[in-house]
Image (cartoon, grey):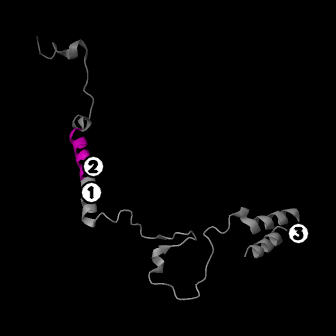
């Protein structure tokens, strides 16, 4: 595959010049990295049952596609944790909405001189 890519690269870049040789070398070796996802293996026998549930990217330890990070936690316990977390944030939002002074007084109270015009408005000490 890399040889064909090198040949195509050299033809695209103009024949057998220095640029074509460097492109052919880079395409051939890929800096020692190999293919991005490992070798492509064409199956020559029937695939096992549920083969699509394994992610095999060429490493020695293929991993399942469906992550089971905590198999010891049941679905009802997970539901309880989810409802508890959502309930906490709902309570926090409700407390913030109830304690929001800016929504109760949407304007800034006007401040007048002479002790806020206390004597002029009729409030005598």
Of residues 28 and 119, the one nearer the viewer is 28
Quarter of the image where one finds residue 100: top left
Of residues 65 and 96, the one nearer the viewer is 65
Left or right: residue 64 versus residue 41 is: left
Q: Position of residue 95 (x, y in %)?
A: 22, 42
Density class for disc 3 (Cα within 10 Å; few <14, some 14-19, many ≥20) is few
Q: Position of residue 112 (x, y in %)?
A: 25, 18
Residue at the right extreme? Answer: 17
Residue at 22% across / 38% down in the picture? 99
Q: Position of residue 123 (x, y in %)?
A: 11, 15
User: Which is closer to the viewer, label 1 or label 3?
Assistant: 1
Residue 39: give its label. Answer: none
Height in image: 34 above or below 109?
below
Identify the residue position indicated by label 2 in the image: 89
Q: Of callouts 2 and 1, which one flags the residue occurring earlier in the amino acid sequence? A: 1
Q: Is residue 32 magenta?
A: no
Q: Which secondary structure is most common in the magenta stretch?
A: helix
Left or right: residue 86 versus residue 20 is: left
- In magenta, the rendered stretch is 86-99
Quadrant, the C terminus? top left
Identify the residue position indicated by label 3 in the image: 16
Q: Of callouts 3 and 2, which one flags the residue occurring earlier in the amino acid sequence? A: 3
Residue at the front extreme? Answer: 60
Quarter of the image where one finds residue 65: bottom left
Quadrant, the N terminus? bottom right
Residue at 22% across / 46% down in the picture? 94
Q: Of callouts 1 and 3, which one flags the residue occurring earlier in the amino acid sequence? A: 3
Residue at 68% across / 67% down in the picture? 34
Given contact means CB atoms under 8 Å apart, are the residues at marks 1 and 3 in contact? no
Identify the residue position indicated by label 1 in the image: 81
């Amino acid at each position: 595959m890399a040889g064909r890519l090198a040949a195509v690269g050299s033809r695209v870049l103009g024949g057998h010049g220095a640029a074509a040789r460097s492109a052919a070398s880079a395409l051939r070796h890929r800096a020692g990295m190999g293919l991005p996802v490992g070798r492509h293996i064409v199956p020559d026998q029937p695939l096992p049952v549920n083969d699509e549930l394994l992610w095999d990217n060429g490493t020695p330890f293929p991993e399942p596609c469906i992550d089971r990070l905590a198999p010891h936690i049941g679905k009802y316990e997970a539901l309880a944790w989810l409802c508890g977390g959502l309930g906490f944030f709902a309570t926090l939002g409700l407390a913030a909405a109830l304690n929001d002074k800016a929504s109760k007084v949407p304007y800034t109270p006007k401040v007048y001189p002479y002790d806020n015009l206390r004597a002029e408005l009729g409030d005598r000490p």
